[in-house]
Amino acid sequence: MNVTRRAQQWIGRSLSMEDALPTQMPTYVNSVVYLFGALTLAALGMLIATGVIIAIFGPGWWHVSRVGHFVNSLHFWSAQTFFLGVLLHMIGKFFMAAWRGGRWPTWAVGMITLGIAVFSGLTGFILQANWDSQWIAGQAKDAMNALGVGPIVNTMNTGQMLTLHVAVLPLFVVCLVGIHLLIVRHEGPVRPIGSEERDS
Amino acid sequence: MSARSEANLRGVPMKPYDLLREGLVVIAVVSVVIVLLAAVFGSPDYPPLTAQEVARKQPVAYLKLVTEYLAGTSDLQTYGPPYTKNPENAQRLFGIAPANVLGVAIPIDARQDFVLKPLAELAVIRPTVKDALGQFQTAADSVRASWIKNYSAALDSAHVVDQSVQLPAGHYGPVPVLMDGMLDVARAGFMEGALDAGSRQPYALDNTKALLFLQGDVESQVAGALDMQGGQWGISHETGNYPGAWWLWPYTFLYQVPVIGNSPNADALAGAIVGLFFVLLLFLPLIPGLNRLPQALKVYRVIWRDWYREHPGS
């Protein structure tokens, strides 16, 4: 068995170039609700770009540099926009019952991505190295300890929070968003409710 | 198209579309909005609370905190896992204490770590502290307890004169010298460094001890003044008029419910409820009844209103 050929065939069957980079869409894809996913992706892109700049100069940079503070502000508002986009996207997909036609895995990957993104946001707030992070780290540690995961995720271990925030969690988020997008494009946009017999 | 897409879109009228152009337009608009928000509103950066600030502005409160650690009466010293051997104090869910599973994985001996070790470092350069520490450590437990009790009670009637904390005459043994030393370490700005210093000096990537040091009443007072306590929606907003982690509102809301917020197991309860809510959302498409909710709410008819207008039989 040629594994590479099998992989080529599977990819060819699963995702054509027209799926990946579509030049046509069903006419029912005609609502502002369809833009919320793109809004989230754009904000994620800004989050990563500004996060990389902060990572290059180090976590203390933005406290001592006006440029650094501005980049931190961009990162802060990108996070706000990202979570606004995620929330709107999720609500929109709920009202569309977008899980119909066997699309639960798409919904599930999105939800897991949201869960990891929330945790990533928490580590980001903890890394601010100011009063907010001091207070949030202290409060969050009680929650972690109460649930028995305090020794594994110590919100007062700044080094651990840093590596989680700039490496581990973004890696998970980006990979899951990629999987989410691939599944979405593989399946095509869910049809309007009542427009097909396979609604379930 | 993939076979799956083909099957899904069979018979559906299509329209021209340009994914990359639409994506670039969205990126451009979102970027401009974020740049404007950052330029106009900036981001919060309220400085952290330090032992130096507390020792300078509220020396008596600082000394009360340190005396509690020396006496072993602070909440932290009976917190339970992962810090202390008090499994009875771990938060519980249906009688089960998850924190007890991993046990004391981050041991904190507040008397040693927060008081006696910093004093031992100060003793190297200050002979009076060295002598006082020697006297304190060689005294009988009952004598030490008596000194600390007397000193702690005297703090209630202490006066601050020219940055010096003055107590009424009493039997405090060497405790005032030790506490004045702790005050000086903090006022000089050395406290957090002394707390974080570990076997990997000069590297201090773990701030657990320094962050735990001011926990309790001192930090709670600051948080209360800034509307950031649990009963004030806690960690879901930042200082000033900035939107914080508003997406945690469902979580912080639980602390506003008296039966949860006032419970000794509040964190465990809130965490478990949020966890259950997440699982419910994760599996919502598979739960009969709940997965038909959108059909009942009919908001989809607004989202796809053009389609339904053109295809009234759908």
Image (tube, helix red, strand yellow):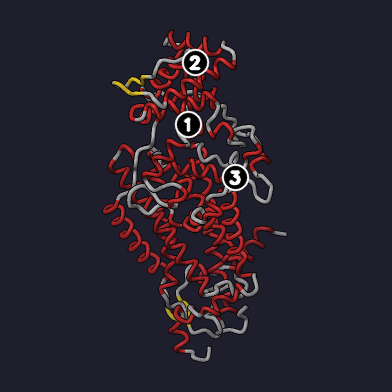
Q: At label 1, which amino acid type do we have?
A: Phe
Q: Estimate how packed mark 1 is, as few (under 14), some (14 to 19) or many (20 or more) residues with alpha carbons within 10 Å.
A: many
Chain under callout 2: B
Q: At label 2, which amino acid type do we have?
A: Ala
Please name the residue shown 40% across and 66% down the image: B23
Task: Using the image as rendered, state which of residue A173 and residue B273 is in the foreground.
Answer: B273
Q: Based on the displayed image, in which of its 4 quarters is residue A112 positioned?
A: bottom right
Q: Based on the displayed image, in which of its 4 quarters is residue B185 positioned?
A: top left
Chain under callout 3: A
What residue is disc 3 on?
A146
Numbered badge on residue A164: none
Q: Position of residue B58 (x, y in %)?
A: 36, 30
Please name the residue shown 43% across and 56% down the image: B246
Residue B173 in sight: yes
Please name the residue shown 57% across and 49% down the image: B263
Q: Secondary structure at mark 3?
A: helix
Q: Secondary structure at mark 2?
A: helix
What residue is disc 1 on?
B213
Chain under callout 1: B
